[in-house]
């Protein structure tokens, strides 16, 4: 799994270069995606965040280059790795259905059908196998405690607002830093800095942001769980600001590098304990 994650981490960098190039930015700006906290943590542990993130970013980079069938395959593989990877395909499919109902389908929309539909078909098929073998749906396996009302999670999580150890402080500071970076991207959007972002990615960012501020007790037990819960929002935040050229976009890129770099140093410091 470590080898898979290291290869995936490299794929995130390559996809970041491609996305930045598609956004009209210097390709090296895309390397900021390597500092998303969920990837920094996930790369050294046997969790699927880095692999799923790499597949989602590859899917996005292919989508931006209108390579729809390869993008659909990448998103399908991502959905089988981590169910939250369905966000962009679900947004695409919802938009297609809306335009179909309003009779506003465009000729280029036809090739997007496979991007929205194939990942969902693969996901439903796999969840059917999961239910048959284990009797529960994967996304609901935490007893409904993954999400709550926006910003209510810290209040209803035992001991969250009364930190006594370094680990407990990290559980507050790292998610707060991620939320701050997301807020910078929101400001960039409001100020019109990000005017070339694909509509599907903009809607996906909005939904992921709403989810990030609504994570519940099951995801707030440790900072590692919380940054994983915010991983999709952080990923789409950096993708969004790569399309921006203003102050808040630049600040978000610099901030994620600073937070991710600091987190790398922290994880290296405790690596002997983890092993």
Image (cartoon, grey):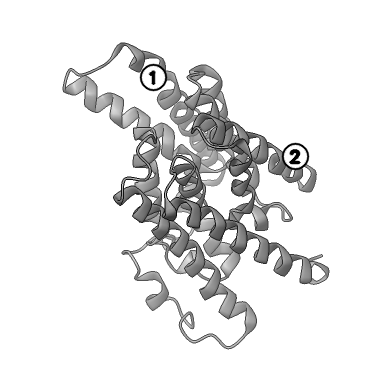
- The residue that disc 1 covers is 113
Q: Which mark is residue 166?
A: none
Quadrant of residue 180 within the rendered picture: bottom left
SS class of the residue under badge 1? Answer: helix
Say few, some or many: other residues with alpha carbon within 10 Å of mark 1 (under 14 / 14 to 19 / 20 or more).
Answer: some
- Answer above or below: position of 78 versus 118: below
Question: Residue 192 in the image: x percent, y percent?
Answer: 31, 45
Q: Is residue 104 visible?
A: yes
- The answer to which image quadrant residue 18 occupies is top right
**Nearer the camera: disc 1 or disc 2:** 2
Element marked by disc 2: helix
Task: Give how far apart the Cα atoms at labels 1 and 2 are.
Answer: 30 Å
Q: Nearer the viewer, residue 17 or 202?
A: 17
Binning the other alpha carbons within 10 Å of mark 2 as few (below 14), some (14 to 19) or many (20 upward) gives: some
- The answer to whether residue 14 is above or below residue 140 is above
**Is residue 136 visible to us here?**
no
Q: Nearer the viewer, residue 173 or 188?
A: 188
- What residue is drawn where x is 46% and y is 49%? 237
Decide if residue 9 is on the left or right side of residue 189.
right
Q: How many marks?
A: 2
For marks 1 and 2 on the same chain, the one whose residue lies earlier in the sequence: 2
Q: Position of residue 140 (x, y in %)?
A: 44, 52
- Front in this rendered view, residue 131 or 272: 272
**The C terminus lies in quadrant:** bottom right
Asked if labels 2 and 1 touch by Cβ distance under 8 angstroms, the answer is no
Residue at the (53%, 37%) spot, across then down: 25
**Residue assigned mark 2:** 7
Residue 41 image offset from top left, x and y in percent: 66, 58
Q: Residue 145 occupies which quadrant of the picture?
A: bottom left
Residue 91, given in percent of the width and then of the height, sits at 35, 35
User: Which residue in the rendered view is the most extreme toward the top?
Assistant: 107
Q: Is residue 58 left or right of residue 182?
A: right
């Amino acid at each position: 799994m470590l080898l898979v994650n290291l290869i995936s981490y490299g794929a995130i960098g390559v996809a970041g270069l491609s996305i930045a190039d598609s956004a009209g930015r210097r390709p090296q700006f895309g390397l900021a995606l390597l500092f998303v906290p969920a990837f920094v943590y996930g790369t050294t542990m046997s969790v699927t965040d880095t692999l799923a993130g790499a597949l989602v970013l590859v899917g996005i980079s292919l989508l931006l280059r209108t390579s729809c069938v390869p993008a659909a395959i990448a998103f399908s593989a991502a959905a089988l790795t981590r169910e939250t990877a369905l966000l962009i395909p679900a947004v695409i499919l919802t938009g297609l259905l809306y335009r179909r109902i309003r009779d506003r389908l465009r000729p280029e929309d036809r090739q997007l059908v496979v991007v929205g539909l194939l990942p969902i078909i693969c996901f439903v098929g796999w969840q059917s196998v999961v239910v048959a073998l284990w009797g529960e749906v994967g996304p609901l396996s935490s007893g409904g405690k993954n999400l709550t009302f926006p910003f209510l999670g810290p209040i209803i999580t035992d001991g969250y607002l009364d930190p006594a150890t370094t680990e407990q402080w990290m559980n507050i500071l790292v998610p707060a830093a991620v939320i701050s970076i997301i807020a910078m991207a929101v400001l960039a959007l409001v100020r019109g800095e990000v005017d070339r972002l694909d509509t599907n990615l903009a809607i996906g960012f909005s939904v992921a942001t709403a989810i990030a501020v609504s994570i519940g007790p099951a995801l707030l037990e440790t900072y590692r769980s919380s940054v994983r819960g915010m991983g999709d929002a952080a990923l789409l935040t950096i993708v969004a600001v790569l399309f921006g050229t203003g102050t808040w976009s630049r600040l978000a890129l610099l901030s994620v590098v600073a937070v991710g770099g600091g987190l790398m140093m922290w994880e290296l410091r405790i690596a002997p304990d983890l092993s």
